[in-house]
Amino acid sequence: MEESDATAARRPLKSRASAWAGMLSGVLVRCNISANMISVLSVVFSLAASTVLICVGRGHLTHWWYFAAAALIQLRLICNLMDGMVAIEGGKKSAVGDLYNEVPDRIADVAILAGFGFCAICQPWGTHLGWLAASLAVMTAYIRMQGATLTGKQDFRGPMAKPHRMALVTGTCVAAAFFQSGIDWVFWVLLVMIFGEVVTACRRLSGISAILRRKWRP
């Protein structure tokens, strides 16, 4: 993939232009840490976040551990930002970089959202909603990738794209850490997320269909 194509395929993020992001990516490049290693590290943080969420939901940890889950989720997102910057701006692209860019992300989404569902374990269908949210997250990503294959364009639209999902989970974790009753909110947050994911999938499918119809020459 040419650099211009790789840049066009990236999710537009304002944080990529921030001073701290540039400094951190520069440090990682100088330390000879590859973008693929950073992608794998994002899965480690996600699995750790999922473990914390499951333990809190089952009552093995206190609600203060929600802070740890929120921090781990943000570390996952920082890894998602850094792997692209190290690969593109840092010149450390690899032949399998696209695989490392996508597959760990899907594992991380499922781990965090399924674990988040365990925080609603006392609610009817709470864990099921977590798995449903995780499945829909994978589906929205699949639609985006399929759209890129068919149209050559990546559609990162929400309202419940990855940054929106992770912001919602992080915000809920912080609120639940301050207010123990916040555990009861997780059920409703998952419902909002699932609705948003369905809308996101429909919007992306509609956009892809519109492009394909314009291109269609019977």
Image (cartoon, rainbow, N blue to C red):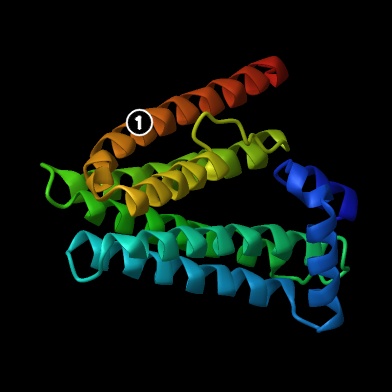
SS for callout 1: helix
Residue 212 in the image, given as x and y percentages of width and height = 64, 23
Q: Is residue 178 above or below residue 40?
A: above
Left or right of 55: which side holds 176?
A: right
Left or right of 68: which side holds 214?
A: right
- Residue to which mark 1 is pinned: 192
Residue at 83 percent across and 72 percent down: it is 92
Q: Is residue 40 above or below residue 141?
A: below
Q: Is residue 9 visible?
A: no
Which quarter of the image is occupied by the N terminus? bottom right
Residue at 17 percent across and 65 percent down: it is 59
Dot 1 amino acid type: Val
The picture quadrant where one finds residue 207 is top right
Q: Is residue 138 above or below residue 99?
A: above
Residue 118 in the image, given as x and y percentages of width and height = 23, 56
Residue 202 in the image, given as x and y percentages of width and height = 47, 24
Mark 1 crowd level (few <14, some 14–19, many ≥20, 10 Å Cα):
some
Residue 64 in the image, given as x and y percentages of width and height = 34, 62
Q: Is residue 29 visible?
A: yes
Left or right of 215: which side holds 190?
A: left
Q: Is residue 218 above or below residue 136?
A: above
Residue at 78 percent across and 59 percent down: it is 21
Q: How many marks?
A: 1
